[in-house]
Amino acid sequence: MSLAETPSGARDDGELGDAAKLTRKDFESDQDVRWCPGCGDYAILAQVQKLMPELAVARENTVFVSGIGCSSRFPYYMNTYGFHGIHGRAPALATGLKLARPELSVWIVTGDGDGLSIGGNHLIHLLRRNLDVNVLLFNNEIYGLTKGQYSPTSRQGLVTKSSPLGVVDPPFDVASLALGAGATFIARTVDVESRHMLEVLRRAALHKGTSFVEIVQNCPVFNDGVHEELTDRAIKNDHQLLLEHGKPLLFGEGLRKGIRLRADLSPEVVSLDEVDIGQIALHDETSPVMTQLLARLGRQGLPMPLGVLRCVAGVPRYEQAVRAQVVEARAAKGAGDFDALFRSGETWTVG
Amino acid sequence: MSLAETPSGARDDGELGDAAKLTRKDFESDQDVRWCPGCGDYAILAQVQKLMPELAVARENTVFVSGIGCSSRFPYYMNTYGFHGIHGRAPALATGLKLARPELSVWIVTGDGDGLSIGGNHLIHLLRRNLDVNVLLFNNEIYGLTKGQYSPTSRQGLVTKSSPLGVVDPPFDVASLALGAGATFIARTVDVESRHMLEVLRRAALHKGTSFVEIVQNCPVFNDGVHEELTDRAIKNDHQLLLEHGKPLLFGEGLRKGIRLRADLSPEVVSLDEVDIGQIALHDETSPVMTQLLARLGRQGLPMPLGVLRCVAGVPRYEQAVRAQVVEARAAKGAGDFDALFRSGETWTVG
Amino acid sequence: MSQPSSSPPSKRLEVVDTVVIRFAGDSGDGMQVTGSKFSTESALAGNDIATLPDYPAEIRAPAGTLAGVSGFQLHFSSKKVLTPGDAPGVLVAMNPAALRANVGDLVAGGILILDGDAFSKSNLAKAGYADHPAKTGELARWRVFEIPMTRLTTKALSDMDLPQRSMVRCRNFFALGLCSWLYQRSTEETQRWIAARFKKTPALVEANTRVLKAGWNFGDTTELFGTRYEVRPASIAPGLYTSITGNQATAWGLMAGAAKAGLQLVYGSYPITPASEILHELCAHKQFGVVTFQAEDEIAAIGAAIGASFGGAIGVTASSGPGLALKTEAIGLAVMTELPLVVVNVQRGGPSTGLPTKTEQADLLQAVYGRNGECPVAVIAASTPTDCFDAAMEAVQTAVKYMTPVILLTDGYLANGAQPWKIPNFADLAGEPASFRTQAEGFQPYLRDPDTLARPWAKPGTPGLEHRIGGIEKDYDSGNISYAPANHERMVRVRAQKVARIADSLAATEVTGSELGEAVVVGWGSTFGAIEEAVERLNAEGLAIGHVHLRWLSPLPKDLGKVLRRFRTVIVAELNLGQLVRLLRDQLTIDATAINKVEGLPFTAAQLTETIRAVTAQRRREERR
Amino acid sequence: MSQPSSSPPSKRLEVVDTVVIRFAGDSGDGMQVTGSKFSTESALAGNDIATLPDYPAEIRAPAGTLAGVSGFQLHFSSKKVLTPGDAPGVLVAMNPAALRANVGDLVAGGILILDGDAFSKSNLAKAGYADHPAKTGELARWRVFEIPMTRLTTKALSDMDLPQRSMVRCRNFFALGLCSWLYQRSTEETQRWIAARFKKTPALVEANTRVLKAGWNFGDTTELFGTRYEVRPASIAPGLYTSITGNQATAWGLMAGAAKAGLQLVYGSYPITPASEILHELCAHKQFGVVTFQAEDEIAAIGAAIGASFGGAIGVTASSGPGLALKTEAIGLAVMTELPLVVVNVQRGGPSTGLPTKTEQADLLQAVYGRNGECPVAVIAASTPTDCFDAAMEAVQTAVKYMTPVILLTDGYLANGAQPWKIPNFADLAGEPASFRTQAEGFQPYLRDPDTLARPWAKPGTPGLEHRIGGIEKDYDSGNISYAPANHERMVRVRAQKVARIADSLAATEVTGSELGEAVVVGWGSTFGAIEEAVERLNAEGLAIGHVHLRWLSPLPKDLGKVLRRFRTVIVAELNLGQLVRLLRDQLTIDATAINKVEGLPFTAAQLTETIRAVTAQRRREERR
Ligand SMILES: Cc1ncc(C[n+]2csc(CCOP(=O)(O)OP(=O)(O)O)c2C)c(N)n1
Ligand SMILES: Cc1ncc(C[n+]2csc(CCOP(=O)(O)OP(=O)(O)O)c2C)c(N)n1
Ligand code: SF4
Ligand code: SF4
Ligand SMILES: [Mg+2]
Ligand SMILES: [Mg+2]
């Protein structure tokens, strides 16, 4: 494993140490998992537990931080350090933790309510600052824990306990919001696509800076099947646009359909039967304009991009920049000396 | 004035009524204006007071709502209804007001701290919902009222009272954030460009939905000259990109420079001396991809777009959608009848 | 079987006053339906009733586990019912987990009805039983009736073309049928309900009805039950009744209060247990012109409510403890701008996230004192589920009359509990219309009404009244920003006086039980029923004990000190570590003995009876010394 | 002129004990510099001193207006100085607005020094004077010295090539030179300061120094002043001193407390008046390893502090009332997770936005009670600017020792006020290192220390101690989620006990003045100096009055009740409508007379002396009846 690919929390020397011997089982805590039968959260938990040993970060150097919601119960089930916070505030807790302990591998687990409703501000500021943490946002487009009110990602028209005549609020476009906030890593995956999820989570773990992963998740109790287009085997091929950096935007059976840009930069679906592959737009993880284009795609009747929508390397990590000033100050002024500090203003002697 | 151009708060019948006789003076309150001498806020106040009579909305139908900050003192100086709220919460106050009284013309005045720091979440949710209000965000890239700490729009490296070694936080790109939140109207203008400001404000007032206007503002006391590129006559031509829908993106002395898109959709500056005008990108207020492109421009060493970056008409206004459900419910169930409501569950008779 | 009196003479009939029955099963077993249908049958039989559901904390814990147990308790009686009952005398347990979680509460000698078919090895294991408890002797204290309900249910449906799962899901109606037989309740209303509920699937109407009847007939024909019970009608004020939960009553009270004031109700809210149902209820009644706004957080919710009040509507917001904490700063803004506002706080177990599905009364001091600066608000508390209606109406009316925020305290126990409600005629309900300032001449935004000290409500759209308000200290009359020292003190004091003035219009403090004497028990909120019942019992024992139940906590009634001093001992009973007791000490300098419980559960009347008896006995001993 | 004793024999020399002087001018006039330099000169002359700046509420109000007046008050004395002084005996007013805003405070017969050149028509008008007040007789009560300072300043600089504006800006040094002469202060240190301050512009060094000397010489040579004053050195503990403001002291105390505990300090904060300077101070000392985080709001600020504490640093956050309100919910999380945390609240005038630049003590009940659920936190208050250092250290140490949030209350008066501070040696400061759990065997996250009841602090990175915490109620030992009723009560009580245990290690309550007798005045926070001085005066009058000043408000000291009961009357003096008095009533059932002031201003010793005298006299009359 090369240094550039070491996640936070791994040993400095690039060796794996004891962490190499860890297995998925080591990351299962002794707490009963208390989600509803069939909840998409189980599948996500399984993949995260599977990823952990691969990262070779010692259990004690890994911390899961969350807010409140079904999704936010996640830390209890990980046999690592964990902090089940208050509603919406996981990014704030994680920021303090990471500033104090930059060497830890910090994971934030949140929901569409926790992260985008009450916690929206903390989330966008986290993304702006580019703290080196990983954010997993379980998007079931509903408030699960409070038994089924609509959320800021619920689609218009959805009938819920708090929207008997249908939701009137336009939903957030999650990737668009993250992009607008300045995120350096934006990805999307689906609870039931375990292999895809693992790959996306791996890239998120290795990204230096805030990795934002929206995990499309089914809540069978309060919003069952809302992501059916992406999960129903019969139709998902036509609705999933699997992204690869530098590759053309292709989808559909046999990847015979593609996304082409019109002159006004709006996207259209074309068939490879009719147009040359050279006309198909190429994915560019570093282009904000491309990310913007992709972010709006799924809701326009075009396929939903899955994978890494944006990844920009080399942007300074917040906690490093903050701590660099400590180093800078020490270089300029020497290590803090209280006796000198106390005497740094005007002084006078009595007696 | 045709109906499509009537702002909220104007008479339904399209007539101007008494409001037609109003002058700028009518909108000046009896309170002493208490900004520092030379503050950019004065110029903004003047333009808003100038715009008001033009809109022909009666004074009593106009409400200015704000949070806390130098900018947020604005309502005191307008001889309309006004609510100087608490820090960051103006969008919330305005939402309740507008839901209760959709016919009013509601203006939110906020700052980069009030609106993007503590109030960031309310702002993005306001934009998402598309309530028909106007947001004026005075961006001086500093916390003025608390005497000079950096804000979420302060540039990296800026030395302030709370960043003696320079700001490490990457700033928000304000237009990008608004776009990510789903704004239907995004514009930018400059405190000292009074004619441009008036034009932008006029368009904001007439937009049906949330109009978001970033007003670049100078704080001579704590962040003097930070917008010099846009305000210094000697150089501003090279830094201001004045937008017009459907027109090519031209700037510079005699509009001889333009923005062209490379194959990977990244922008570059070209000279009309060398390339044909046909290669210059055209502004499209309705294209999210174009808005994204423009939003990032100014900070990339390219000129700063001024004017309307985005304007999408026809998106339902939140307060109308909310109230439509009242109408719908009445149509389905008749006007509310308490005696029927009380008897709507299982009932039994005693005695 | 249509008549409850069809029992064959072979069965003994016993008349009893009062029954407390609890239905318990897995979350998926439909116990809430069973319980509420049985409640309706009992109400129709003329009994006084009170009910309390008990949901699991998890949405849907794994089937058969202790975490997944859901319960519903009903207290029905031929006498006045004040609480959902201390301890059940009858427990219906649909699986081992339900048994284990609940049997400890069952009174000795109580009736225990089990679905024997559910006591499989795996279910027993999930509940932590090594063996069937009926066989280990550990159920010996109770009268156990083990009935193969699952098999009897499927047998009753054997000729229907239904999946096994669907058949089994009917078994809650077997239990209901059986209990209806046992207590001679008519199932007619239940049959009507089944017909309506499942009308889209006639097979389910048929199935559930059959199983209901099977349950009834099982009781009637089997030799298992030698006795049936009769609970005679209670003497209840005649009228039309319905059953209403606290949260529903709160929602209706808010609507009615606003309507009486002639105001639009704008409800800003962010979901939180156990307050969410107020939102659900309100948003279902848009035809009343109610505007509900599900905000991005609690601060936006109250912000919107305040904005709406500024606009001339009555702004209301509701939450539970953690949400109230977040609204703190904004309540201060409403105090400063002197706008009407109702903040409902459905208390739950704290601190922090605490016990979200449990009840507690530990937010009182937060409501009264929990804001920066001298920031007085009115605080009212509801005492029963139906009282939530009256308290909510009163909160709206008071907020408007005094131009002040009012905090209405209820709690999880009231919110989910249900009670029969004598349906009023809307026209008969008391309530005054709000008045808005329209006269421009002499207008100053903070000129006060000499009686209420309320400032005028001048809403946008009114020509000539343009004005500006905000959270900075304001000049006494003009409301303009003022930093003047003496003005600040004057304003701080007048804001406090305004809230104090509310006490002018409060009725004299009522004492139930003894009017004076040995001790008075002071309570507030949802403990009303338990305290009242305990005091009644103690009065019956001959002790001179009174009960004062506070509706307004801020301001306290003016005569309270005088009333309490009629008793030798003042006892304050509350579900916290002692909060009202602090208010009495610091505002009336009355010392009091505190009875506290912080278990996430209500008081039982039995507990209280015993504790009050002990406290008074102790006092007597001390006095003798 | 280097020696202050150079005065010609023609001038009378008067020895005085105590002087209170106020410099007032436009915000742009440099009054803060003048005041603080004069303070330093006085300290160097051996006087005891206390200072208080008074900034305008607006950042930069229009020049010459009342809103733009800025002031700085200094109290210097040959005796012990407890406050910045009640009313100034000397007022230096640089323009009409400064005169108008301040002259009302000047004691009758006091010295009034004016820059006569600033009394132009337009300046008079801006201040609301129709005519020059010196001519209308309205200044007759004072000894007026009208000096053409502006002209004398520019004259002194006439041969320098400076713009007129720059010259005029030097005139504050004229005033300083004159006052230095008047009170025989050496200006050497000021000259050094000028040389350092303006070292990049030698012309300004020259100009300001010249004007300073011109002011001195003007006093020395003109006939205007017949008398000079001498304030002899006070008997002050020998040592090295510096002048420190409350906010600076708080910042240093936090740093020192963390360093003594061997902990990294992580400070999460959102700017707010009057707390922002703590952030400014801390972020200037990154070489101490201090990490400051300017968060997006107060909730994020405290959230980050809690996260840092979880990570094994000491998390600290600071704000003022409205910000504390927003932090309420998160404080509950820290209580539940039992993590150390310090929350500084620099109180200001409330409610809501209130009087942001003014002082008040009205957040006490919010600090003690303002959270949902039973949510105990420790509350400590600093009494003087320098005490902020000790109180902050103690807050950090207590938070760590008891694994609990501690709220440190200061206020705007302390925050901006300055006092001489006897510089300690860091090595001599008391403080214990924090200890972290590292032993995996037998580890349970909530197993408690038997003495302090603190749970172990196990930080991420420690192998074998992986555990999970959160805001839901937890099992007594394991810390796993628990909804069990009895466990909840046990946890609620143990959290309360833990905070109560802090009282075990508090020193015995100290009484100054009379040890027992007629009355005791109880205070807390920044009123210390004024109360102490008032009590001293009353003791001098022969009244047996004591003063108890509380440092810990939660828990209260164990012996407090006993100590207070030694006095016939308990008086509580505070800058609110009565908050500590409620705590005493509800926790000690001690009734007390409240002395309150809510004007955004501190008590003066004179006010208090009079009021306490009146209260005790009244009590005596009542007792006689
Ligand atoms: C301050 C506060 N407000 C409200 C709540 C109630 N609450 C708990 S979880 C939740 C929404 C959860 O939605 P989401 O984050 O999407 O999680 P999910 O349950 O869907 O996984 C709400 C509103 C709370 N616990 N605290
Ligand atoms: C709850 C709360 N937190 C903090 C403050 C302090 N505060 C007042 S204004 C302000 C920042 C204002 O910045 P901005 O919105 O950019 O306004 P400007 O003064 O620059 O116009 C802050 C932090 C406050 N008043 N209330
Ligand atoms: S309510 Fe929905 S999201 Fe929550 S655990 Fe159940 S299925 Fe999962
Ligand atoms: S501080 Fe800056 S923003 Fe505020 S009034 Fe002064 S110049 Fe304007
Ligand atoms: Mg969700
Ligand atoms: Mg600003």
Image (tube, coloured by chain):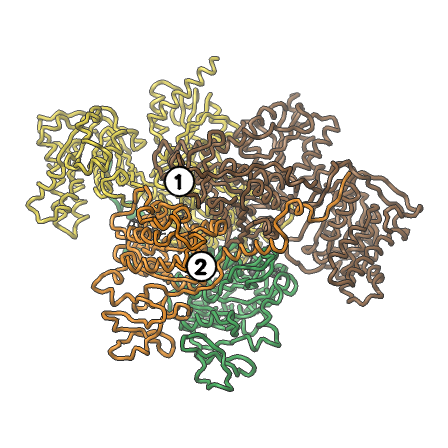
Chain colours: A orange, B green, C yellow, D brown
The quadrant of the rendered image in which ligand 4 is seen is bottom right
Q: Position of residue B349 (x, y in %)?
A: 24, 38
Q: Position of residue C223 (x, y in %)?
A: 9, 28
Task: Tell which residue pokes out farthest to the left in this image.
Answer: C159
Name the chain letter of the residue that bears numbered label 2: A
The quadrant holding residue C241 is top left
Q: Which residue is mark 2?
A: A209
Instruction: Using a 10 Å C-alpha cutoff, classify the residue at mark 2 as few (fewer than 14 neighbours), some (14 to 19) or many (20 or more).
Output: many
Disc 1: which residue: C354
Q: Cα distance, mark 1 to mark 2?
A: 34 Å
Instruction: Give the answer, above or below, for where B153 lies relative to A351.
Output: below
Q: What is the x, y in percent for residue B41? A: 59, 64
Relative to C102, say whether D270 is above or below.
Answer: below
Q: Amino acid at mark 2?
A: Gly
Of residues D607 and D306, the one nearer the viewer is D306
Q: Is residue B65 above or below residue B274?
A: above
